[in-house]
Image (cartoon, rainbow, N blue to C red):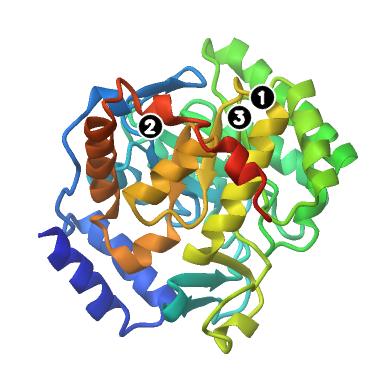
Amino acid sequence: MIDALKLLSRSGLFLLDPETAHGMSVKALKSGLVPSCAAPGDPRLSQEIAGLTFPNPIGMAAGYDKNAEVPEALLKIGFGFTEIGTVTPRPQPGNDKPRIFRLVEDQAVINRLGFNNEGHGAALARLQGCSRQALIGVNIGANKDSADRIGDYVAGIRTFYPVARYFTANISSPNTPGLRDLQARESLAALLAAVLEARDEEARKNAKRVPVFLKIAPDLTEEGMDDIAAEVLAHDLDGLIVSNTTLARDGLKDQRQAKETGGLSGRPLFGKSTAVLARMRKRVGPALPIIGVGGVHSADTAAEKIRAGADLVQLYSCMVYEGPGLPGRIVRGLSELCDREQLASIRDIRDSRLDYWAARNA
């Protein structure tokens, strides 16, 4: 069944342009046409991170379910958690089409979507209908034409606080002009102070503390990583997500599509994002939770993210090529890894290749 789903995904959806295919896959999940591919629960894969209990370490990254249309359906196909968004206060159409490009030879995707979404109100209405037990994170961003970008992030915290299990402040998309400037130290300090103050106020009102993660880019200099680590450690941040898409185009086979502007994701991002992950782990120490993202397409690559310093792992683009059975296959593969290596917990392999990856060229 899983192999058939993978074949159907490739042969059917690849006849369509990427954005149409994406919309069709969301509709299929919404209608229940995609059967459950979830692996059996394995307590060795369960972890408590940032005060939340994750049944397995594999999550759907933001970008797929921008408008909170299918978060619970994604959990049913094997993900341990999922993240909706990026969502902005006001609806916005994003950049002009076409804006998603498949690099099939590279098993990669380039997108320049530009935070296209239906806004806070639409996403909130859908999330209010979801189970409060479902592990659904909310990825918040700023409108392209916002006069107060930090205020947009604060609005995201306040709007979604009753329904979010965790937040991600996305300051690392390359497709909103100037957004990555928020990674600069002075701007980041102001952003974190405002977002975390809003979180703490809402925590008192709602009698619960919702964790806040920060999503960073893979295209940082060593000095940029130093600055981010310093500000993260100076504030009461709950964790990092490393990383978003890259502007780099190194080593791609499809040179025609590689000329498209936007962020590159998929298999070619694995090495770069994993090296940045390890370097950030070195900087922030062992206690801060980190979610590793970029190029994960198998149990082996998911495990390697953990060995490089990740507590949890997210994926998205590789599911375009591997089909909806991918999260279940990865979870089963991690259980098999625990069997082979006689692990009491998948966490036992964390940081075991930290030095190797930290020394790699990003």
User: Eyeballing the image, is 200 above or below 314?
Assistant: above
**Which of the two discs, 2 and 1, sits closer to the camera?**
1
Q: What amino acid type should be assigned to the residue bearing mark 1?
A: Gly
Mark 3: which secondary structure? strand
Alpha carbon separation for disc pair 2 and 1: 26 Å
**Left or right: 333 as drawn, with respect to 117:** left
Q: Which residue is mark 2?
A: 135
**Which of the two discs, 3 and 1, sits closer to the camera?**
1
Dot placed on the residue nearer the N-terminal end, 3 or 2: 2
Which label is found at residue 239? 3
Mark 2: which secondary structure? loop
Identified at 51% across, 48% down, the residue is 293
Mark 1: which secondary structure? loop
Q: What amino acid type should be assigned to the residue bearing mark 2?
A: Leu
Determine the image quadrant of residue 1: bottom left
**In front of the other: 190 or 305:** 305
- Residue 206, how many percent across, how many down? 53, 14
Alpha carbon separation for disc pair 3 and 2: 16 Å
- Residue 92, how many percent across, how many down? 61, 62
Alpha carbon separation for disc pair 3 and 1: 11 Å
**In front of the other: 198 or 63:** 63
Identified at 52% across, 54% down, the residue is 294
- Residue 305, how many percent across, how many down? 48, 43
Q: What amino acid type should be assigned to the residue bearing mark 3?
A: Gly
Q: Which residue is mark 1?
A: 285
Identified at 53% across, 10% down, the residue is 207
**Left or right: 67 as drawn, with respect to 55:** right
- Residue 343, how many percent across, how many down? 30, 25
**In front of the other: 17 or 323:** 323
